[in-house]
Structures are given as C-alpha cells and as structure tokens.
Amino acid sequence: MKKFSGLLKDLRNFFLTFMIMICLVISFRAIISPEIVIGHSMENSLHEEDYLLSNRLAYSYGDPNYNDIVSFDAEIVAGHDLFIKRVIGLPGDHIQIKDNVLYRNGKEIDEPYIKEPMVTKDLDVKVGESEIFVMGDNRNNSMDSRDFGPINYKKEVKAKVMIRLKPFNQDFNYTK
C-alpha cells in the first residue's frame, strides 16, 4: 500500500510539473513571437532567413519609438502574410522625401543603416493619430509606407522585434 501511495504521489507531482510547463509555454507564446525574415527589404540590418524573437505586448502599454523594427500583418498587400520594417515616423510627424532625401518634420534623417542611397519619387505625408510610417532599410527593394501609407500601430502591428536568434555571428544594429 505504501508503494502505491508513493506512486500516486509521484504521478501527481509529474502531472503538476507537466501542467506548469504547459502553462509557461502558452504564456511565453502569448508574449513572444518567433519570426523568420522573408525577402531582402531589411538588408543590411536583417537578412533573409534570419530568426527573430518579437514582443507581442510591446505596444499594449507603450508607444513605438523611432528606429523600432516592427512586424505587422500585410493584408493590405495580396500574397504577403507579414512585413518587417523600421519605424521612421510617429503620430503627428511630417514625412517628406525630396530629391531622394528623407526628412522628418523638416529635418534630414541620418540613416547609417540603409543599404544604399534611395531612388524614389517625392512624397509628402502627415502621420495620423495611432499611425506610424515604416520603411525597409533596403529602400530600393522594399514595399512600405511609401506604397501603402502609414499603418495603424494599435490595430496592425503584431510585435516589436527584440532579438535576432540566428545567425549569431551578425550584429543586430537596428538602433543605430
């Protein structure tokens, strides 16, 4: 009888530990989103097939900042599920592109992270409330807010990219 009672205790402990692990995994997945970079629009900061961890709750209690890298649903573009882009403009900002130079609120933006100088049409956009203006770092190979306009970060942004898991040998220089 003592063996049976010990076995029941062991089974109960195992089941309890198993249930705690399941709860932790579910909680982790509710907060952290693994993502894989598809395409070349964020080069040289991110490369195709980079593995990323993103925080799904980052903007639930806070607002985006300049240079945040965000993932968002790409329902606005047929054939795409997810975009990963850099935040260039915040609510209330005036974004302009004149002669291939990017300006925010009348001041040229220093962008050491872009792959090559941008060649694009002129643009003049006022970023609305709860909106952000996003662009890929590979400006000449990116579909971004220049094409579809600012996005509503409260409704469309899925997560803020926090860390690159793979490859380990590259710097994750998104805040430069």
Image (tube, grey):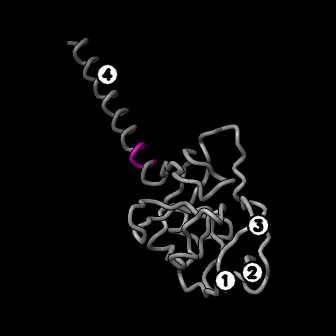
In the picture of the structure, the residue carrying the numbered disc 2 is: 99
Asked if disc 4 and disc 1 are in contact, CB closer than 8 Å, the reply is: no
Q: In this rendering, which labeled residue sits more in front, label 4 or label 2?
A: 2
Which three-letter amino acid code belongs to the residue tagged 4?
Answer: Asp
Which three-letter amino acid code belongs to the residue tagged 3?
Answer: Glu
Q: Residue 122 shows which numbered tag? A: 1
Q: Residue 163 shows which numbered tag? A: none
Q: Secondary structure at mark 1?
A: loop
Q: Nearer the viewer, residue 6 or 130?
A: 130
In the picture of the structure, the residue carrying the numbered disc 4 is: 10
Could you tell me residue 5's position as x and y percent? 24, 18
In the picture of the structure, the residue carrying the numbered disc 3 is: 111
Could you tell me residue 8's position as x and y percent? 25, 22
Could you tell me residue 124's position as x and y percent? 64, 87
Compared to residue 76, the image places residue 57 above or below, namely above
Q: In this rendering, which labeled residue sits more in front, label 4 or label 1?
A: 1
Give the CA separation, mark 4 to mark 2.
72 Å
Q: Main secondary structure of the magenta part?
A: helix
